[in-house]
Amino acid sequence: MDRFVQLALSGIANGAILALVALGFVLIYKSSDVINFAQGELLLIGAYLTYAMVEQFGIWWPAGVVFAVILSAVIGVLIEQLVLRPMIGEPTISVIMVTIGLSSLLRAITGAIWGVTPRPAPQFLPTDTVTILGANVGVDRLWAFGLAIALFGILTLFFRYSREGIAMRAVADDQQAALSMGISVKKVWAVAWAIAAITATVGGILLMSIFGGVSGTIGRVGLLVFPVVILGGLDSIPGAIIGGLIIGLLQSFAGGYLPPEWGMGEVMPFIILLFILLVRPYGLFGQRIIERV
């Protein structure tokens, strides 16, 4: 029972971080129909920017985190304007290849600036442990879960009550109708990329603090975004949250209960990905689109 509780809480915390990163992916897809294969690299850049602000420039860590988040948002907007906006009207496969190339470019840039050697990261979260139902759980994972939920709450209020959030919902529902109402679709796309970069950066910061270091391996977490969004639905924000929690729990239980040499903790999300694609390709909460010709 103790091990089950420990694995469950760890999986929920990891799943919340995955859901944060997946949320940015879904926002970009909903607003512009772009499948962003560079989401993991946005997470990596956010982690390294935070490391640079706090460790290299010596900025007080709360201010350093804020600066890193702002810079990440600016990078997201620049990517949308300089890389994706010129691809409007191009075939879907061309846009996909651009995001794949962008992924490699961003990874190369981070490697050129900070190198490939893992660097010790500042500890933003407490490193103590607490006992819950007889299981010892790291406080950092509880903090990560709480901060992720808080950010979800802020974004929910943003989408529901702010003018920009309502515009994003309108564009996601029907771009042509939104244009007829005077909504700037290009502005909405820029905001979507900025939010995607912000959520990825927060996820990178949480992972960096939990792992105690920053390296290129953090960017690999972005690969888990695809099982999450396929499970929840490419166009579903609640699906991204639920999918993240499910994948986080499956990864934790598979790694904890199955033999370590099998490596099922890393493989299980992709087994689920293949299963969902075969059985329900639009995901648990995705919109089922039927084209008649």
Image (cartoon, grey):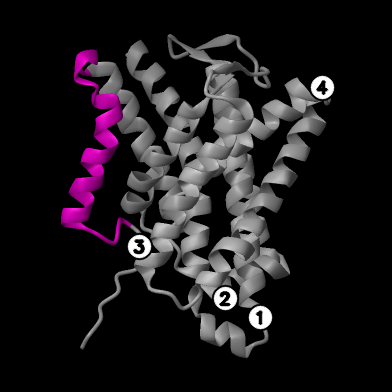
Secondary-structure class at tag 3: loop
Find residue 261 and report its image quarter: top left
Circle 2 is placed at which residue position? Answer: 170
Q: Amino acid at mark 1?
A: Ile
Please report whichever mark, 1 or 2, sits nearer to the chain's N-terminal start: 2
Circle 4 is placed at which residue position? Answer: 58
Select label 2 or label 4 by which is in front.
4
The answer to whether the residue labelled 1 contacts the one labelled 2, judged by CB atoms less than 8 Å apart, is yes
Secondary-structure class at tag 1: loop
Circle 3 is placed at which residue position? Answer: 286
* 41 on left or right of 193: left
Magenta span contains residue 260: yes
45 or 196: which is nearer to us? 45
Secondary-structure class at tag 4: loop
Q: CA distance from mark 1 to mark 3?
A: 25 Å
Q: Residue 198 appears at what percent x and percent y?
A: 64, 46
Q: Is residue 156 visible from the viewing direction of this image? A: no
Please report whichever mark, 1 or 4, sits nearer to the chain's N-terminal start: 4
Q: Amino acid at mark 4?
A: Gly
Which contiguous range is marked in magenta?
A: 258-284
Q: Residue 217 appears at what percent x and percent y?
A: 46, 27
Residue 183: image tag:
1
Magenta span contains residue 73: no
